[in-house]
Image (cartoon, helix red, strand yellow):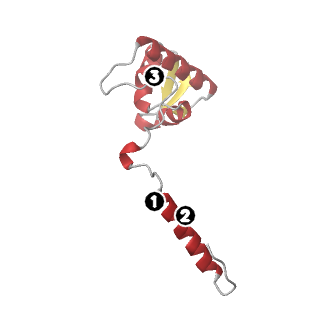
Amino acid sequence: MTTSSNIHPFDLLAQHFAELVARHLQGAAPSPAAKEPKARAVASSPRRKGQKRSAALIQKTTTELLAHIKAHKGERIEEIAEKLGVTTKDLKLSAQKLLAGKKVKTKGVKRATRYYPA
């Protein structure tokens, strides 16, 4: 980048930005297909589409969910999933097991459902 006393600061900024963009485009920019998958839970492991989770993994997720509900009363499943780093789909079975075992209770319906320890 060349600087001169007669170049306006905005021109310098535009030139710098253009150089940064050019460097980025010349580099190894990730393609849309090469993006990393969404963050999965510590509890969930990468598995092929349609592959079932192991009983041990489901139990671990259920235990983590119960501990989180006890520590953070009244959160929605979306909030819990975000904090645990899992999808709401991965938490659904664990939540059903906790409800069936009367370890947690809920208030609200559908997406407004909030979870509380029993």
Snapshot quadrant of residue 67: top right
Residue occupied by mark 1: 25
The location of residue 30, given as percent across then percent down, is 43, 49
Residue type at mark 2: give it.
Answer: Leu
Front position among marks 2 and 3: 2
Snapshot quadrant of residue 73: top right
Tell me: 53 left or right of 113: left
Residue type at mark 1: give it.
Answer: Leu
Q: Earlier in the sequence, mark 1 or mark 3?
A: 1
Nearer to the camera, 8 or 98: 8
Residue occupied by mark 2: 20
Nearer to the camera, 95 or 5: 5
Label drawn at residue 4: none
Residue occupied by mark 3: 95
Contact (Cβ within 8 Å) of mark 2 with mark 3: no
Whole-number angstrom distance, CA of label 1 to CA of label 3: 46 Å
Quarter occupied by the N terminus: bottom right
Looking at the rendered structure, the secondary structure element under dot 3 is: helix
Whole-number angstrom distance, CA of label 2 to CA of label 1: 9 Å
Looking at the rendered structure, the secondary structure element under dot 1 is: helix
Residue that extends furthest to the left in the rendered view of this protein: 50
Looking at the rendered structure, the secondary structure element under dot 2 is: helix
The location of residue 65, given as percent across then percent down, is 53, 23
Whole-number angstrom distance, CA of label 2 to CA of label 3: 48 Å
The location of residue 116, given as percent across then percent down, is 55, 25
Q: Earlier in the sequence, mark 2 or mark 3?
A: 2
Contact (Cβ within 8 Å) of mark 2 with mark 1: no
